[in-house]
Image (tube, helix red, strand yellow):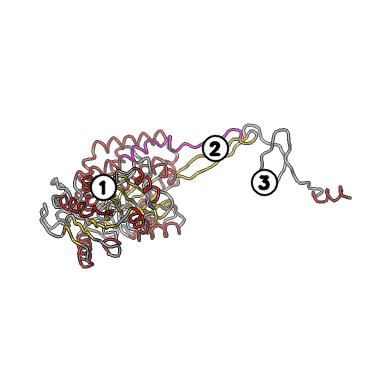
Amino acid sequence: MITLYHWADGQKVDGKSGRFSDVTNPATGEVTASLPLASSEEADEVIAAAAAAFPAWRDTSLASRSQILFRFRELLNARSAELAAIITSEHGKVLSDAAGEVARGQEVVEFACGAPHLLKGSSTENASTNVDVASIRQPLGVVGIISPFNFPAMVPMWFFPIAIAAGNTVVLKPSEKVPTAALWIAELWKEAGLPDGVFNVLNGDKTAVDALLSSSDVKTISFVGSTPIARYVYETGTAHGKRVQALGGAKNHMVVLPDADLDLAADQAINAGFGSAGERCMAISALVAVGDIADTLVSKIKDRAVALRTGDGTRGCDMGPLVTSVAQQRVSAYIDAGESAGATLVVDGRQGSFDATGSGFFVGPTLFDHVETGMSIYTDEIFGPVLSVVRVDSYEDAVELINANPYGNGTAIFTNDGGAARRFQNEVQVGMIGINVPVPVPMAYYSFGGWKNSLFGDTHAHGTEGFHFFTHGKVVTSRWPAPSHGGINLNFPQNTVPGTTAITRSVTKPRWQSHQANAE
């Protein structure tokens, strides 16, 4: 077992707080590393390293920043398999899924390589006589990123490539369950030539989070996690004057209309419900069967679910373990609750054998039918491989169900009716919509984010909104080269039409007195 570290000012920093957390391989139950949990003083030191590096990085040319980003991209492409293996060893997702996570994160790195174009301002010549106006975007300073356990690489990469390209410095606080990916990325940045202090890693728990939220040096917070913590991060961060984007939980619905290709729908329900053991904020956890197709659709999903192989993610299995024993117990408890509430348990993931050595944290694919909206397996974000089928009579019932839900992250509809699909994308109150696509995660040049309790703040992740989030706007009004000798005028500035003079009030005789004299 190894002891991990923080990363500040381009080097490893040993923990000094005396507090540690175990890092575990969830497929075997083996403790693989000891992670130092930062004290508030240690957090301040890491933040100070980022603050000290900011002025020089802010003043580094866009051309130089882009060259470093391109080098980071090439290194990541060449060594992506290393990062995928780290993710599997600490999160548990199968290697192919981990490789896909790295690839989706790399899309944002590639998008950020276009920063010189994306940071362009605008200008207006001769807005007033001999006066030019220009808008520019400038970096904010130190950026705090608090990332979740389920995507140790992709979610941080939604934020830090854009933040760095825009001229900010970064403090990344990864989940203490999966810290090694962040440390690996830090060393890759150094190899790419990123100046020391621009990218830093702070390991810890709530103490580290609160240090980021309260530090006057940290200007923005980007968070992904559960809704209660997202709300806490948003309220605390904004109370300390920060710009915050806090992405919360989800309860994603997949609507299947009677005209849909049911084999396609069943395949995609399996992919979206059980990929990464359901530990995705975009996972489909509620399948809404419209009309009389439910029996056939449930049968098709069952046939596919029981054929999946669950086990160690390094063994070519279809699905890996949950991230911790606590997660395993929580998901199993929801299955118990669903049974007790009267839902039909079609496939029980608590049963069966798993392809792994040791005591891994496994729950297999689980399928419920006849789920009612008052059951906890429907109302709660389970974050595990549990798919609930809800039966409704009509399209209108399905939309009403989705819109009544407090979450609004992602949703999908499966249909061959273009009119129904177009109506759905217009009427449903959700941030990301899939049409015959079950997990509609946008490309990097579009923005990721939900509605309602799935997002706190007004800015989504990556895309052009990302560059807006990590920069301030500034407007410069200038007159060159001759100075103005128009005399003193305390009125509000206004434009004048050539050949006329601005209307000014007489200092010696108020206008109302002049009018009175004329009347007399």
| Mark nearer the viewer, 3 or 1 | 3
x, y (%) of residue 319?
Answer: 18, 50
Q: Which residue is mark 3?
A: 492
Mark sitting earlier along the chain (2/1): 2
Q: Which residues are magenta?
A: 107-126
Mark 1 is on which residue type? Ala
Q: CA distance from mark 2 to mark 1?
A: 41 Å
Task: Pick whichever, 307 or 467, lies toward us.
Answer: 307
**Residue 134 got which mark?**
2
Q: Within 10 angstroms of label 1, few (less than 14), some, or many (20 or more) residues?
A: some
Mark sitting earlier along the chain (3/1): 1
Q: Classify residue 346 as left or right of residue 117.
A: left
Q: Which residue is mark 1?
A: 181
x, y (%) of residue 425?
Answer: 37, 47
Mark sitting earlier along the chain (3/2): 2
Residue 493 is one of the magenta-drawn residues: no
Reply above or below: 84 against 149: above
Q: CA distance from mark 3 to mark 2?
A: 20 Å
For numbered disc 1, what is the local secondary structure? helix
